Image: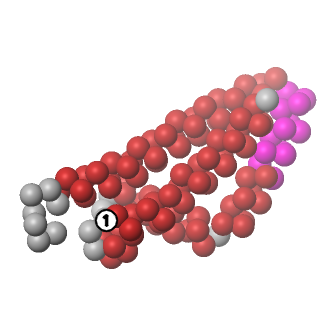
Amino acid sequence: MGPILLAMALGVGAWVVRLPSLLWPQVLRGGRQGAEALTGWPRIVWQLSQQSGHYGYELWVAIGIIAIVCAIVAYYSAAVRRLVYLTAVILALADIAVFVGTVAVVYSDALQGVGNPGR
């Protein structure tokens, strides 16, 4: 069950990380240039999103390999099984953090444009 949860967390993470490159150019002021002008964590998420879009096939192959290897190793070791569960939980929390950060950047940009008719 742990490797399945890990594969699901990795799959959702791959989708969530891809989300900014699909969403931000459409909704941020300045479009793609506005997204590329971000700084800090949003900039890191933007670059990761760009790379995951470029290497999409390789990303899904790596997720499959990780899930299979974890399933094989976890079958024989209870300690590794616990580690796989813990990793799945940590990845799920990271997925949530990236999603919330993605939405926060959109709302922050939208709120900066409130009251500015020349936006």
Q: Assess whether residue 3 is covered by the magenta stretch.
A: no
The spot of residue 22 in percent (x, y) is 48, 65
Give the residue type at disc 1: Leu
Please tell me which residue lies in front, 104 or 75.
104
**Residue placed farthest to the bottom in the image?**
33
Above or below 18: residue 67: above
The spot of residue 114 in percent (x, y) is 14, 56
Image position of 17 (left or right of 114): right
Image position of 65 (left or right of 7): right
Q: Quadrant of the C terminus?
A: bottom left
Judge whether residue 60 can be spotted in this image. yes
The spot of residue 108 in percent (x, y) is 25, 52
Residue highlighted by disc 1: 28
Residue found at x 66% / y 66%:
56
Q: Quadrant of the N terminus?
A: top right
Residue found at x 90% / y 29%:
76
Callout 1 secondary element:
loop
The residues colored magenta run 65-77
